[in-house]
Image (cartoon, helix red, strand yellow):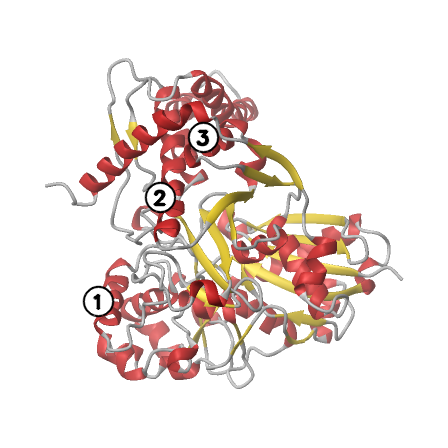
Amino acid sequence: MVSYALGLDYGSDSVRALLVDTHTGTEVATNVVAYPRWRNGLYCEPTADQFRQHPLDYLESLQSCLAGLWAIAPKGAGARVVGVSFDTTGSTPIAVDAEGTALALTPAFAENPHAMFILWKDHTAVKEAQEITAAANASSEGYLQFAGGIYSSEWYWAKVLHVLRESPEVREAAHMWVEHCDWMPAVLTGTTHPNQFRMGRCAAGHKILWHERWGGYPSNDFFSAIDPLLDGLRDTLPSETFTADNRVGELTPEWAEKLGLAVGIPVGFGAFDCHMGAVAARVKPGVLTKIMGTSTCDITVAHYDDIADNCIRGICGQVDGSVLPGMVGLEAGQSAFGDLYAWFKQLVSWPLHAVLSESAELDEQTKSHLINAIDDAILPALSREAEKLVPGESAITALDWVNGRRTPDADQTVAMALSGLKMGSQAPHIFRGLVEATAFGARAIIERFREEGVVINAVVAIGGISKKSDFVMQLCADVWGCEIEVLESEQSCALGAAIFAATVGGAFEDVASAQTVMASEVCKTYKPNINLAGTYNELYRRYERLGDFVDGGVQ
């Protein structure tokens, strides 16, 4: 009998549903729905690095997404789904009250940004992250030893502390704070109440400082010494965490009706999008999986014996079972990749937008059509011209830190820089410099892994950029000096979630068995041009020198 697994992927802008045949691995149907409030820019202040999302965006978009999925899926497919699993961006926490209700879902906080999910790229908590880093590295336990040595403003405790300081109303109403990837399964299984709430290993280990060595989280004394506002919060979190091949519970009748699914099917523990995407890519030791989108997230795994007690400096954590059960998951990434290209597109298109918007000779429909056409054409045109340039020809060097630096060595206070601009520098020259910067930023991550004894021999790429730009991918292969395989699946993160859904649903004995049937195949391979190795080595050294200067290493 035909059975399906349902993977649900919450990205920065939209939710994606993927239905996969558990017998053949065929991706049967997929649907994507954008978050309406987020799309309209509500609750965000980009100039202040504030990015918040309303929980209703997640809940309403999920219902719309599945309604659309069943419209294109085989008839009766919803009744044949054996399991559901989620992946989300992260760290993306929200405050909940003593009953487990997200504060933004209550009338008093329905329009309060501090009561909403704090998106991964919200960097309002830089000061708090610095305080946590200093305290953790001074502690006798060395609470950051498994988290790269630096606590980031993109992570849970920094964001929580920042909101507690900024909003007395939220501070008074909040009982605990939960991650998006843990909240979604809890909602669907009716286990949001603090007495029932359970957490996945992925978010807890990589962002919330969970580790078996200290019996869960750092001590309450550690947190309250940083700020009394944190007193007692760690005790609201369950000390036990679970890998994503376990089930949180069963789908409630209420949500089964809303989503067109059968009552009682198992819902798995959630994880971050990049970690589940790596599972769809058959991640293994020696292979780095890069999710290449607005930012990047880099994932690899290691055997226990290979990594032992080696603590990798400057990454986003090493966590037992965060990717594959029975292996240590290692995470790194860049705070901006596609976002850097998007920033440049907006920069060069601004005058065109302004002129068209102010034109009295064009009607509104024509203006809108022209603006959309220009936006769609800019990056392809820049790529075509940039690809014609000889590496190093323009002498432009750029940093990729337009949204701070995630790894190696997290620092959200650093900024992007450009050097080598001259009167002859045109938009394609600058764009090539930006693409090289993102490739160099990724190379810095690869080299840090290697310096720390983690073997990286090849790269598997997933995400939009890997499928859209031959120019970017070939340049990356040349800069990194290794092959890059691009996955066939258009929804690799959702596919990883579906693999876990099939496992918790009993279609497979374990994740490895599910991968043999359901993991994505490779559609394209980029091989490095060895003749460019010397040139890119020199350009990379320029990137490093510019980074040292901007980061304060050169006085």
Q: Earlier in the sequence, mark 3 or mark 2?
A: 2
Q: Which residue is mark 1?
A: 134
Q: What residue is shown with label 2? A: 444
Secondary structure of the residue carrying tag 1 is helix
Residue type indicated by callout 2: Ala
Determine the residue located farthest toward the bottom in the rendered image: 195
- Numbered disc total: 3
Q: Which residue is mark 3?
A: 478
Mark 3 vs mark 1: which is more N-terminal? 1
Residue 34 in view: yes
Q: Is residue 434 above or below residue 355?
A: below
Q: Quadrant of the N terminus?
A: bottom right
Residue 301: where, in percent of width, then height?
A: 51, 58
CA–CA distance in space, label 1 to label 2? 24 Å
Pick the quarter of the image with the C terminus.
top left
Q: CA distance from mark 3 to mark 2?
A: 14 Å
Q: Which picture quadrant has residue 428? A: top left
**Residue at image coords 37%, 23%:** 351
Q: Percent x, y for residue 185?
A: 60, 70
Q: Nearer the viewer, residue 295 or 476?
A: 476
Residue that sits furthest to the top in the current view: 424
